[in-house]
Image: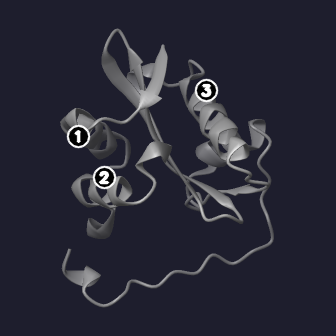
Amino acid sequence: MNIRPYKQSDAELVSALWDEVFPNNPSHSSPKLVISQKLAVQPELFFVTEINSVIVGTIMAGYDGHRGWLYTVAVSPQYQRQGIGSKLVQHAEKVLIAMGCLKINLQVRVSNAEVVEFYKKLGYLIEERISMGKLVVGTEKL
């Protein structure tokens, strides 16, 4: 298993992986759009995992100088429960900590209890917060 930075040539394989792992994502989270946006902002925080030169996992992270965030942790269903997701999260954590990050946040859909348990095993806690979002003008056509 090899964790490495994302390369532009990974786009098709990563998009296919995300479509498989996140089949009901809204249009503003389409792989093509998300990848394009990530490559414009902190592309060095976008990683893929390969096994025998096949991309089987991804993680994106972000850091605003105050908090870090984890996004799109995805592992191909046939490779799940083999420690790949944990290694991706730990890799991103290490990079964020090296940047000076003191706290890392993430969001999980309420309906995704299995993923909540995954993160709990990695030391993440459910915090008493309300997550709020706003789809800004122009993006509703995506």
Lower sequence index among marks 3 and 2: 2
C-alpha distance separating marks 3 and 2: 21 Å
Q: Residue at x 61, y 26 (%)?
A: 87
Among numbered discs 1 and 3, the one appearing first in the sequence: 1
- Residue 131 percent across, percent down from the top left: 63, 75
Res 11 label: 1
The kind of residue tagged 2 is Ile
Which amino acid, mark 1? Ala
Give the crowd class for mark 1: few <14, some 14-19, many >=20 residues within 10 Å.
Answer: some
In this picture, is 116 found above or below 126? above
Determine the residue positioned at 39% across, 83% down: 135
Which residue is farthest bottom?
137
Q: Are marks 1 and 2 in contact (CB under 8 Å)?
A: yes
Q: Nearer the viewer, mark 3 or mark 2?
A: 2
Rendered view: 23 above or below 49: below
Front-most of 7 and 122?
7
Q: What residue does disc 2 label?
A: 35
Label 1, label 3: how many angstroms apart (C-alpha)?
Answer: 21 Å
Closer-to-camera residue (103/121) = 103
SS class, disc 3: helix
* Quadrant of res 53: top left
Which element type, helix, strand or loop, lies under badge 2? helix
